[in-house]
Structure formats: C-alpha cells, structure tokens
Image (tube, rainbow, N blue to C red):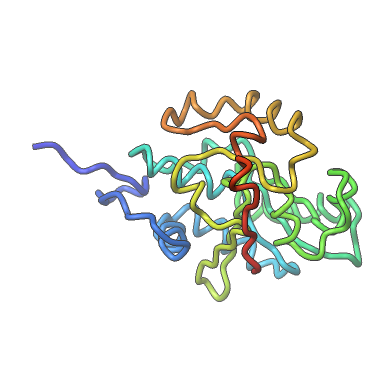
Amino acid sequence: MRQPKDWLGRGGMNPAPPLRAISDIERLLEAHVASHALLLHVESIQLPDAWIGAGFIRNSVWDVLHRRTIDVARLADVDMLYFDRDDTSKAREAEIERRLRMLAPGIPWSVKNQARMHLHNGDAPYHNTADAVAHWAETATAIAARTVEGRVEVMAPYGIDDLLNLIVRPTPVFGHKMDIYRERIITKDWPARWPKLTMLMSWQEAYPASHNSFDRIDT
C-alpha cells in the first residue's frame, strides 16, 4: 500500500495541506517545526518590525504545491528583516546575525535593516518593513512572516494569488527595473526545481494593457 507523503518533513505522515488563504500559510508554518522554530528565534530577540521573508515562505509553498517535502535546510539564506531608523549600521546587523546563529547554528541568516535598504535598491525611503517588502522584485516573493506570542502572522502586500497559482510576476514598482528582474529570475532558475511555474518575463505579459494595475493590500 502506498504511504502518504510526509509533506512537512517532520517524521509524521501528513496529507498535503490545502493552501487557499493567508491563514492556510500561517497554519503551514506553525505546523512545520523547523520553520516555526526560526520564527520564534526572531521573536525572542525583540527587534522592531521584525519578520522572515522571501524564499523562506515562497519555497515552502511551492514545495507543497509540487508535492515535495518542505526543507528549510535547502535555503541559500534566511532573510530576516527589521526596521530601525535609530541604528542603520551594518555592525548592528552583523551583531543580530551572530545572535541568531547562536540560537540556530547552521542556518544561513541574512539580516537587513529595511530602514537603510532603500539606498541599496535606489528607492525612496521605506515607511516600515511591509513597505520594503512591497518593493521586492516578484509578487510571489513579496511575503513575510513573524510570530506574535508564538502565533504565526503572514503579511503579503500584493496578496498570495500569484504565489498559490505558481506565477512569477514582477511587482508593480519594478516597471523601471525589468532588466534586474529578468537577470534575477534567469539566475535563480526556479523552474529547474519547480517545473509548474509560469514565468512572466516581460512587463506586457505581467500587466496587459487591459489589466495594467495590481492592487496592493495595506498591512
């Protein structure tokens, strides 16, 4: 008899969880022990407006939708974000990375204070972490999670339709950065791991003239 897939990669046999809403992704991250543990570590150091974003969530969702086991160990980095205008030094980021590596050895933490990242990205100053995430390259990547008293919260400035429908689309703010977007997704070569992805390579594909706007969800 064929055994059900261990979707969460935690030693128990679990059916594929339905993913239809942000609350489903929140439950997925709470159920996955390794993912939840990393979120709890970030909460424990009590930084302002602190989240884990990008591939940490995106890859887990794509893995589930491709009937694969979630494996945070395959992440090239774990993007931890916070927002602190009072100290935007890289030394402070390095200090936080050291603390996180003590809490979770072997995890490739990448800590960035979003109060300074607009300079790196050539944008106007961000208002908070959600505003920074809204300026990322792809709608499916523009997502982050945190725990509040242990409960997972997910924020997604452009919603999760593209993420759940396996669509790679530039965010609306990337209209003048399409060369960066294309170079990034070619380098990532995501279809090699997730072959069901639909890759929108041009602005015209992503935003046809009759649908040239993409609603941003306030968080």
* Whole-percent x, y for residue 161 in the image: 49, 52
Q: Is residue 210 above or below residue 46?
A: above
Q: Where in the figure is residue 212, as x and y percent of width and height?
A: 64, 47
The quarter of the picture where the C terminus appears is bottom right
Q: Is residue 33 left or right of residue 137?
A: left
Q: Nearer the viewer, residue 212 or 80?
A: 212
Residue 192 percent location from the top left of the image: 48, 23
Name the residue furthest left.
1
Between 38 and 167, the one nearer to me in the picture: 167
Task: Name the residue: 63% across, 24% down.
Answer: 186
The answer to whether 64 is drawn above or below residue 158 in the figure is: above
Instruction: Find residue 65 and report its horizontal and vertical position in percent.
Output: 38, 42
How many badges with numbers are in the image?
Answer: 0
Q: Residue at x 51, y 40 (%)?
A: 167
Rendered-image quadrant of the N terminus: top left
Q: Nearer the viewer, residue 203 or 190?
A: 203
Left or right? Give the position of 172 relative to 166.
right
